[in-house]
Image (cartoon, grey):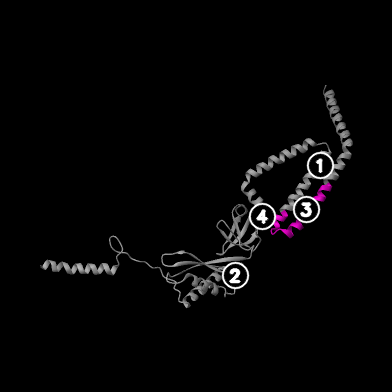
Amino acid sequence: MKFEALDKFWHLINEKLQLWLEVSIKNLPNFVVALFIAISFAFISRVASNALRKLLHSTLESRQIADLLASIFRIIVLVIGLFIALDFLGLSGTVTSLLAGAGIVGLAIGFAFQDMTENLIAGIAMGIRKPFKIGDVVKADDVFGNVRTINLRNTLVETFFGQLKIVPNKILFRETLTNYSVLGIRRIEVPVGISYGDEPQKAAELIVEKVNELDFVIKKEETAVYAEGFGDSSINLLVWFWIDYPGETGYMQARHTAIVTIKKALEDADILIPFPIRTLDFGAKGGEKLDTMLSSKVAQAKIKPDESAK
């Protein structure tokens, strides 16, 4: 009985092996073609990704972003070649399962690393859009400084206080971003007050003339002074002028020089920049000056002794 069972078992294995061998021989040409397709796509993906990497290196500021995009492109080409090879072998069900599995895995990774994924996508988008480049002066949220490095997930900004801030790319991509280096110019505003006894138009013409004499001032036809309003002690003026930015003369130095020039010009023209003035109003109902009130008090004090003497 044991030999009959063993013989039956061996006969079953032999049939299966012969069936697999026949199927393998029958599908051998398809297997060779599928292998050729996979190898061809591997070669094409390598050549194409290298060419794309060189192109992206010349167009994008960040080499990391360029390398990532080239690698993603290579993987996509490889996956396409693998799916074509499997479909050529008649394994369409396997292709469907792989696609479904890839979708589930991608969804799980997206949820698990949501913040990292958002920064990565923002970095890729900024690498393509290029809202700024290395060396630009940018401002976003509470960050203001020079861009030093652009990475896949973050950007390094050196602030004007000498600090290096690591800013997640999603902040730069999502928040309002101001790039001060794109146009290459910047307007400076300087507030100044003159006394109510001076003529605002005369002061404005004098300030425009003196500010336009400064070497770093550009677009001199747009240098202007506007009356901003009535202050407690002065008529408030606002001085506008343009400089190259970034330029040889920095923003703070240009503003400092302009303030010194405006002060000297007004002093030479005998136009007063007043100190804060306070008018004291005395009396229960107001409208009385201090000396008047004191004189009245002294007079009352003199009258009372005379009345008591009578």
Q: Nearer the viewer, residue 73 or 198?
A: 198
Residue located beneath label 1 in the image: 84
Amino acid type shown at disc 2: Glu
**Residue 18 horizontal/vertical position (percent):** 88, 32
**What's the distance in space between the residues labelled 2 and 1, CA to CA?**
67 Å
Labels 1 & 4 near each other (Cβ < 8 A): no
Query: Mark 4, mark 3: which one is toward the viewer?
Result: 4
Q: Is mark 3 on a helix, strand or loop?
A: helix
Residue drawn 78% across the image and 47% down it: 77
Q: What element carries label 4?
A: helix
Query: Mark 1, mark 4: which one is toward the viewer?
Result: 4
Disc ID at residue 221: 2
- The range drawn in magenta is 39-67
Q: In this view, does 221 lie to the left or right of 237?
A: right
Q: In this view, does 115 lie to the left or right of 295?
A: right
Amino acid type shown at disc 3: Ser
Disc ID at residue 18: none
Query: Mark 2, mark 4: which one is toward the viewer?
Result: 2
**What's the distance in space between the residues labelled 1 and 3, CA to CA?**
19 Å
**Residue 232 horizontal/vertical position (percent):** 41, 65
Query: Mark 3, mark 2: which one is toward the viewer?
Result: 2
Precedes in sequence: disc 1 or disc 3: 3
Residue drawn 73% across the image and 59% down it: 59
**Residue 39 horizontal/vertical position (percent):** 83, 47
Amino acid type shown at disc 4: Met
| Crowdedness near tag 1: few (<14), some (14–19) or many (≥20) residues, C-alpha within 10 Å | some
Labels 2 & 1 near each other (Cβ < 8 A): no
| Quarter of the rendering occupied by the C terminus | bottom left
Disc ID at residue 126: 4
Residue located beneath label 3 in the image: 49
